[in-house]
Amino acid sequence: MKKTLLIALLLSVGFPQTKMDINNLIERGGLLYAPNDNKPYTGNVFNFYENGIEELNGRYRNGIKNGKWKWWNEDGGLDSTGSYKNGLMNGKWTYYHENGQIHGQGRFMDGDGGNPSESSGIPSNGRHGRWTFWHENGQKSEEKTYKKGKQNGLATYWYSNGQKEYEGTYKDGKLDGLMTEWYENGQKQTEETYKHDELISSKSWNKDGSIIKNVCISTDFGIMILELYPEVAPKHVESFIQHVKNGYYNGTTFHRVIPGFVIQGGDPNSRDNNRDDDGQGGHAARYFGHGDENVTASWTLPAEFNERPHITGALSMARSQENNSAGSQFFICAAPVHRLDNRYTVFGQVISGLEVIQKIVNVPRDRRDNPSDKIEMEIDICEK
């Protein structure tokens, strides 16, 4: 009878729980210990900001994170909530904007908290299942599906005004299928087809709905308008347009001009006053499967040789002896150069401003065919 009463009393008041300031725990061999304790710490932990607001509250078991955790901002608003299992992020997690609106919500499976997403700032390692994100105004911003940390299925992004911004299909973390981007006004911007992250086809539109096929190269000698050929060289056109949109070419020069042959430019090294490295720089606008994916400067384009001839005004891509070595440098033919046909990738043609080529190609130049006076360029998307 006495034993039964004792058990009932303990259940009614609860067992005492251990709580400790996380700053007082000691790390040894990857585990946390309470001072003067030889066993890894089991119990709750907490911490406070200098203003007295609680910063975090969670639980350790045998020296590693296990159980539910919460974090707060300095103003007392929730920052994030989630749970751990054996030190890894597992289960449902929720992240909040500073205004209290939910920022992101989804589940982890053995997440390590690393590799924060560029778009949300929330860890992506270990995401599993449907993840949803919101703008600070409460409008949905992203919706993605993951399988063991890799994107699988449809991914959709929205602008803060509710207009769809991006939609693409993924398989094992790679684009596979149709990818579409829209301007904020609702007009389609880009439509591309991928197969295992390899670009198969690409189209781009201006904000007014017209197809992007023309670019303008502006120099002190005049403006050249060029039509691009995405139907025969989709990767070259994609990389070129992306560089144009990012302003990559602005301020670069035509660093090599040879009468009866070509004018060549597009090297970022040519922006400065050091002529020695002109013609040695530049890279593709994104990773196309050549070079080191983690080293931007190594990205090159796969050859897309085609039947377009190297006639006067042809826009073609410079490269080294290796076929798949083109980066950002391009050349424009100052005369027919048919010996380059099917050996270099033609991806456009000057349709207005052929006289500008002749003005540039005949300027005084040094022994390396670099113009004595720098010929800078700006390249923009334009209409004929």
Image (spheres, rainbow, N blue to C red):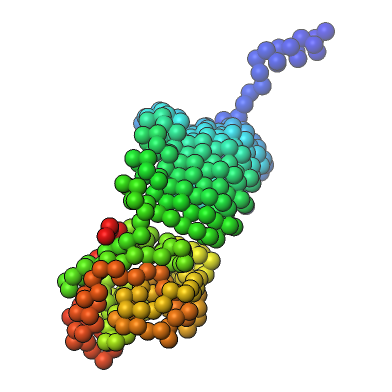
Residue 115, placed above or below residue 106: below
Query: At x 55% / y 38%, what residue is drawn?
Result: 131
Residue 7 rendering spot, x and y as whole percentages: 76, 14
Q: Position of residue 14 (x, y in %)?
A: 66, 18
- Quadrant of residue 353 within the rendered picture: bottom left
Q: Is residue 219 above or below residue 245?
A: below
How many labels sit on residues? 0
Outermost residue toward the right?
1
Relative to the observer, which residue lies in front, 199 or 99? Answer: 199
The spot of residue 230 in percent (x, y) is 43, 63
Q: Which residue sits at x=32%, y=78%?
A: 312
Residue nearest the viewer, comparing 240 with 269:
240
Position of the N terminus by quadrant? top right
Residue 55 seen anywhere in this rendered image of the structure: no
Q: Quadrant of residue 369?
A: bottom left
Q: Nearer the viewer, residue 155 or 309?
A: 309
Left or right of residue 313: residue 301: right
Question: Which residue is farthest bottom?
Answer: 367
Q: Position of residue 361 (x, y in %)?
A: 24, 82
Q: Is residue 212 left or right of residue 202?
A: left
- Asked if 39 appears above or below 249 in the picture, the reply is above
What quarter of the picture does the C terminus occupy? bottom left
- Is 222 or 8 nearer to us in this picture? 222
State the residue at coordinates (37%, 84%).
337
